[in-house]
């Protein structure tokens, strides 16, 4: 009986020991929460690449038309919209044929003499349209506007065509107002030259009260490229009808382009740099005068 009782007590103790929890050291260590994989920052939606601003073709250098004029006659060179150009014309008043060579040398080839000076400003009002003002030191003012009608292109347009209109007056536009209208036709000859024919009508050119008071003329000229930036220039303005005193004005010269500048040394038998002055002719066939033009494009 005692043995059975002891056996029962021993079984109870064994059950108690087996039912106790294991010690803390044997417990499984808690696992840390799994880290969420880091996501790369969201990239902004890619924008299409910026398109380069289209260049104005009127801003490109025209190797056969580096300037808006020959010596005095206008050309068909276009002025870009909202851009400007400035020109100085200078015609010395001493004839190169006066006196002998010693006299000419003493006057430093005419540079010591007086001069008729012109200042010109032009502005690109819109594509193909330019306006401007030209004033000479004898107080003549010419206001002009020029519209491009056709541009010569290799796709079948063989000529350039502009229309020009001017209003000119003496004594700062107070006296003898002479309006003019004309057509400017240009043609490029390969990569060597550009030639021009310009029929022009100028009203009220005569200071006389009798006879014809208007002049019809045609400007003929050209520019030949002899070096990449060097040119020979020539022009003549025969008057076909109406008032035509003196002789037809003619000019020739050499010209150089440097960046936005154009420098020209010229020789003329007159001082005219406006259409009204050209209509009134040169001094004489035996009188030639040295001069120069300086032009600057602001584009």
Image: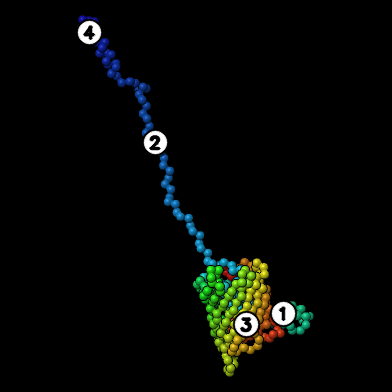
Say whether disc 1 or disc 3 marks the residue closer to the N-terminus: 1
Q: Which mark is residue 237?
A: 3
Q: Which mark is residue 110?
A: 1
Say whether disc 1 or disc 2 marks the residue closer to the N-terminus: 2
What residue would you read off at disc 4?
5
C-alpha gap between disc 1 and disc 3? 24 Å
Give percent across and percent down for residue 70: 62, 76
Position of the N terminus by quadrant:
top left
Please say if 171 is above or below 254.
Answer: below
Please say if 227 is above or below 250.
Answer: above
Label 2 Cα neighbours within 10 Å, binned few <14 / some 14-19 / many ≥20: few
Say whether disc 4 or disc 3 marks the residue closer to the N-terminus: 4
Position of the C terminus by quadrant:
bottom right
C-alpha gap between disc 4 and disc 3? 151 Å
Q: Nearer the viewer, mark 1 or mark 4?
A: 1
Look at the numbered discs 4 and 2 and tell me whether their residues touch, using CB distance below 8 Å: no
The secondary element bearing badge 4 is classed as helix
Look at the numbered discs 1 and 2 and tell me whether their residues touch, using CB distance below 8 Å: no
Give percent across and percent down for residue 120: 59, 76
Give percent across and percent down for residue 29: 37, 27
Q: Which mark is residue 35?
A: 2
Label 1 Cα neighbours within 10 Å, binned few <14 / some 14-19 / many ≥20: many
């Amino acid at each position: 009986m005692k043995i059975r009782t002891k056996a029962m007590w021993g079984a109870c103790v064994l059950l108690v020991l087996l039912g106790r929890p294991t010690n803390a050291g044997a417990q499984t260590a808690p696992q840390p929460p799994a880290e969420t994989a880091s996501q790369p920052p969201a990239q902004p939606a890619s924008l299409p690449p910026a398109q380069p601003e289209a260049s104005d073709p009127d801003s490109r250098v025209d190797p056969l038309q580096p300037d808006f004029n020959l010596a005095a006659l206008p050309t068909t060179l276009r002025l870009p919209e909202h851009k400007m150009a400035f020109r100085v014309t200078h015609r010395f008043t001493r004839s190169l044929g006066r006196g002998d060579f010693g006299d000419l040398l003493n006057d430093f080839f005419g540079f010591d003499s007086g001069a008729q000076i012109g200042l010109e400003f032009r502005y690109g009002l819109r594509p193909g349209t330019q306006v401007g003002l030209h004033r000479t030191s004898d107080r003549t003012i010419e206001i002009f506007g020029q519209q491009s009608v056709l541009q010569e292109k290799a796709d079948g347009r063989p000529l350039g065509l502009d229309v020009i209109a001017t209003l000119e007056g003496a004594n700062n536009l107070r006296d003898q107002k002479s309006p003019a209208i004309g057509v400017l036709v240009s043609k490029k000859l390969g990569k060597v030259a550009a030639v021009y024919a310009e029929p022009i009508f100028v009203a009220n050119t005569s200071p006389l009260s009798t006879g014809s008071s208007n002049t019809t003329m045609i400007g003929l000229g050209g520019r030949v490229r002899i070096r990449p930036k060097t040119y020979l220039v020539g022009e003549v303005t025969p008057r076909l009808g109406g008032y035509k005193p003196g002789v037809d004005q003619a000019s020739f010269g050499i010209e150089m382009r440097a960046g936005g500048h154009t420098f020209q040394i010229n020789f003329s038998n007159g001082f005219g740099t406006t259409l009204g002055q050209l209509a009134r002719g040169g001094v004489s066939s035996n009188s030639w005068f040295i001069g120069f033009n300086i032009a600057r494009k602001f584009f």
